[in-house]
Image (cartoon, rainbow, N blue to C red):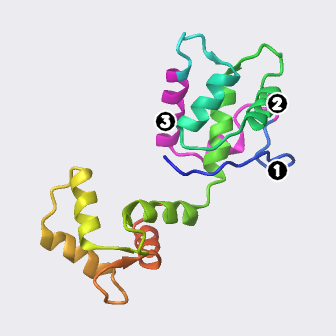
Amino acid sequence: RPGRQSLGSRRGGALEYRAGRGVQKAVKMISKEQRQEIKEAFDIFDSEGTGKMDYHELKVAIRAMGFEIKKPEALELMARYDSEETGHIGFEAFEEILAQRYAAQDPVDEMRKAFELFDEERRGKISFRNLRRIARDLGEQLTDDELRGMIDEFDQDQDGEINEEEFIGIMKQTSLY
């Protein structure tokens, strides 16, 4: 998940963690798939299987999930979530931290980042060639006619390519965000 932005500290917000309050709002807002990704990441970075991770593991795990984090923010998270000052946090704290980051993502911003991945030449448009390459990379067996049909269906300005506005419209219409 390259390019995700850091939330920074969200003190005082509705998503702020409060130890001992059980499942937080942010955790309830994430999808089953996101929850599974978080669990898998925790398990990978909890390499000794202790059910805990330290500051360094936290920082690397957050980055591996596609979010930015700097040392001061990671230290602040450890201080906030490691209430017993053991130098470690457990899965529930890790899940809450990542759930907050997922919940704070701007869907349109994420769509723009996805568009940039398709727009290899940085022309502001997705060409037939871009779409064909991506379909192949994803293992989709689509014919050239099917790919042209996809472009034709969503190409509102009739220039034979998909611009960012058209792409965002596709994403919203198909509930892919």
Q: Which residues are magenta?
A: 18-44
- Can the viewer see residue 176? no
Q: Residues within 10 Å of mark 1 (few under 14, many from 20)?
A: few
Front position among marks 2 and 1: 2
- The amino acid pointed to by label 3 is Glu
For numbered disc 2, what is the local secondary structure?
A: helix
Q: Which residue is mark 2?
A: 80
Task: Give the prevailing secondary structure in the magenta stretch.
Answer: helix
**Spatial separation of the CA atoms under disc 2 and disc 3:** 23 Å
Which one is earlier in the sequence, the residue at label 2 or at label 3?
Answer: 3
**Spatial separation of the CA atoms under disc 3 and disc 1:** 25 Å
Task: Say the numbered circle drawn on residue 118.
Answer: none
Q: Which residue is mark 3?
A: 37
For numbered disc 3, what is the local secondary structure?
A: helix
Q: Position of residue 81 (x, y in %)?
A: 78, 27
Q: Residues within 10 Å of mark 2 (few under 14, many from 20)?
A: some
Q: Position of residue 177 (x, y in %)?
A: 48, 60
Q: Which residue is mark 1?
A: 13
- The amino acid pointed to by label 2 is Arg
Q: Residues within 10 Å of mark 3 (few under 14, many from 20)?
A: some
**Is 68 part of what is drawn in magenta?**
no
Tell me if 168 is positioned left or right of 77 in this view: left
Residue at the farthest front position: 121
